[in-house]
Amino acid sequence: MTQSPIVRFEDARLAYGSRVLWEELNLSIAAGEFLAVLGPNGSGKTSFINTMLGTTALNRGSVSIAGEPVRRGSSVVGLIPQQRPFGDNVPLRARDLVALGLDGTKLGVRLAHKSVRGKVDELLEMVGATAYANRAVSDLSGGEQQRLRAAQALASNPRVLLCDEPLLSLDLNHQQAISEVIHRQAVERGSAVVFVTHEINPILPYVDRVLYLAEGRFHLGSVDEVMQSSVLTKLYGAPVEVLRVNGRIVVVSGDGNRALPADGHDHAEDIDLAAGK
Ligand SMILES: Nc1ncnc2c1ncn2[C@@H]1O[C@H](COP(=O)(O)OP(=O)(O)OP(=O)(O)O)[C@@H](O)[C@H]1O
């Protein structure tokens, strides 16, 4: 990890009406750093990403990227968005979608160019999508489409790579493969990676720091600093236990002793620490 900051939040506050998602956030993300963003549903993870995309405005403070105030459509920012299926009317093959991520590529114009084809093939290989390179995007499964989104975001070699739950609907092998590819982007090409996830275990080996959002508060630090019973209990304002089991992190609600994913959200929804119920 290199040290030069590429993203800088200063005294940042985001609230919708009276609901504060976070405030007094001072955070510099270095080139090559891998930052995991955790927190229960509705804690503001996607909104955090949106502030760096320039699509959500802070109520106070500032966020800059490469020394400039954030703006929509910045070419130095790449996004693997939260999964939404492509409609039947998307007339693209898998390789066309990836090519759209390459700077200046216009369908039918540069796509025929040998170097573009080579680059697209390389990206498809990286995310394990070579086998379906020529299939229509709309015929692919959610996980297959998600791998293409990752390849498309990596195509432009962004200085800041924003990933909004990129592992959703991927099987374990592909979770591992995509996590590795994203980590390599940070280490080898110096991208700052912001990785929103409900499940920290697949990326545990790669995370430099964790930003944990909950209940309008946040805690920032290394995995070991943040993923502690005392820290999460304070953040949630409710008893939470963090256990290490065979190298995995398991978060358990203090009352029911029920295992929750690392973000403290119980998908069975009978314990909802997120909503403070
Ligand atoms: N434009 C908006 N106006 C008002 N409220 C909003 C707006 N965008 C998001 N919210 C609310 O802010 C909260 C945070 O939303 P956000 O999508 O950032 O959460 P999240 O942590 O990404 O959640 P999840 O884990 O469910 O994806 C939610 O309660 C959401 O309803």
Image (spheres, helix red, strand yellow):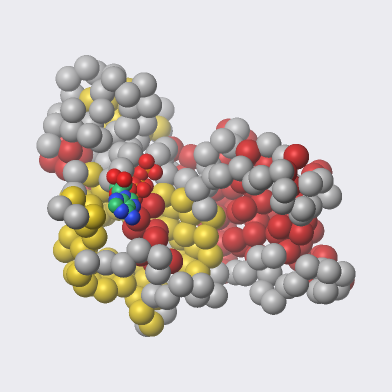
Residue found at x 66% / y 45%: 87
Specify the quadrant of the image occupied by residue 204: top left
Residue 22, above or below 73: above
- Which residue ends up furthest to the top in the rendered image? 256
Please tell me how many numbered marks the rendered image carries. 0
Where residue 229 appears, x then y in whole percent?
A: 19, 35
Q: Position of residue 202 (x, y in %)?
A: 48, 40
Is residue 132 visible in this depiction of the protein?
yes
Would you place residue 232 above or below residue 80 in this image? above
Using residue 237 as the reference point, say whether residue 66 is left or right of it: right
For the C terminus, the image quarter is: top left
229 is higher (above) or lower (below) than 149: above
Q: Quadrant for the N terminus, please.
A: bottom left
For image coordinates 32% across by 24% down, the residue present is 269
* Residue 48 position in % (x across, y down): 34, 58
Decide which of 221, 8 is in the foreground and name it. 8
Q: Residue furthest bottom?
A: 67
For this orientation, the residue located farthest to the front is: 89
Front residue of 160/86: it is: 86
Image check: 18 left or right of 224? left
Q: Residue at x 66, y 65 (%)?
A: 101
